[in-house]
Amino acid sequence: MSNAIFNLNGRVWIETADEKILGHGRIELLERIQASGSIRQAALQMKMSYKQAWDLVNHMNNRFGQPLVTSHRGGKGGGKAIVTEYGLKVINHFHVLHQKLQEFLKENLQNLTF
Amino acid sequence: MSNAIFNLNGRVWIETADEKILGHGRIELLERIQASGSIRQAALQMKMSYKQAWDLVNHMNNRFGQPLVTSHRGGKGGGKAIVTEYGLKVINHFHVLHQKLQEFLKENLQNLTF
DNA sequence: TTGCGTTATATTTTATTTTATATAACCAAA
DNA sequence: TTTGGTTATATAAAATAAAATATAACGCAA
């Protein structure tokens, strides 16, 4: 039977020896960049500052061996950002992990006795 | 084969509809209170302020149906805090969850391809 | 060549969180 | 009855984090 009061939740993330480099929030950011073609639009959608979004993208690009996002300024629309093939692969990979975790959480919620 | 650069990590926690009420850090706090018999000593060990530790304990006691920690001031040693039977049960339960998550993480690290 | 909307970056300001400080209440034991 | 070390609580100070602001660079399109 399920527990009506408490819920079991969780997160997974990718880290190096000393820092987190990819998790739930960054994945959402990547997806919104992919959908909008713009770091700024993605930031607005997630109610974060452009600076914060740019820092996150920059950090990911630095930590992974190759860029997950490439960007250009000027031109039609003022500029653009796209998620690379590698970035898309990372997103998909993370989705699988996330899905598996949801199953894990669902299974273990059943056993909660408090 | 395992991945030499990246690691997969994660956490689980108990929450109500609107807030987290028990996770990794609070469990460690409970354990240290149990071991030392003191909120203050537990806080010192975890390098957090007494206030922060007390707030966490108070929050847990409020959110769960019954207290996980009971405390008394004055007397021998100046006062004391103990983890209730219910609290001990919660700790053990969380340990099982944590252990299962570690296995989950270990299994899925194998599949990391980036 | 001018304007547009974005990327990229630095700096300042504001807000939030954390830590420090102070103080009262408490009670067993000396 | 005094001491000691803790619980419990409030307030002030300090440290961090977040947000706002400003500005240059950019290149396509009108």
Image (cartoon, coloured by chain):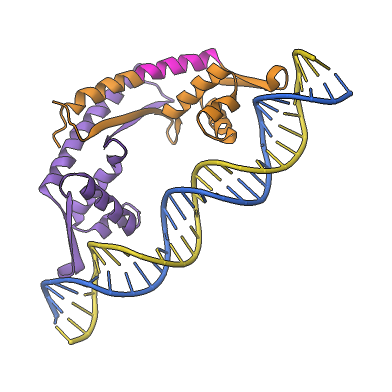
Chain colours: A purple, B orange, C yellow, D blue
Q: Is residue A105 above or below residue A76?
A: above
Give the magenta part as a residue range.
B84-97
Q: Is residue C3 above or below residue A86?
A: below
Q: Position of residue A7 (x, y in %)?
A: 39, 27
**Which is nearer the eye, A16 or A50?**
A16
Q: Position of residue A19 (x, y in %)?
A: 31, 39
> For this view, does B91 lie left or right of residue D11?
left
Which residue is painted at 45% across and 29% down in the image? Answer: B25
Q: Is residue B34 above or below residue C3?
A: above
Which residue is painted at 32% across and 20% down in the image? Answer: A108
Q: Is residue A6 above or below residue B35?
A: below
**Which is nearer the eye, A106 or B49?**
B49
Which residue is painted at 21% across and 53% down in the image? Answer: A33
Q: Position of residue A17 (x, y in %)?
A: 28, 35
* Residue A91 in view: yes
Report the quarter where the C terminus of chain A lies.
top left
**Which is nearer the eye, D1 or A88?**
D1
User: Does residue B40 show up magenta in the picture?
Assistant: no
Report the quarter where the N terminus of chain A lies.
top left
> For this view, does A12 lie left or right of residue B114?
right
* Residue A1 in view: no
Q: Main secondary structure of the magenta part?
A: helix
Which of the 4 quarters of the picture holds residue B6?
A: top left
User: Does residue B89 show up magenta in the picture?
Assistant: yes
Total labels: the figure holds 0
**Which is nearer the eye, D11 or D12?**
D12
Q: Position of residue B85 (x, y in %)?
A: 53, 12
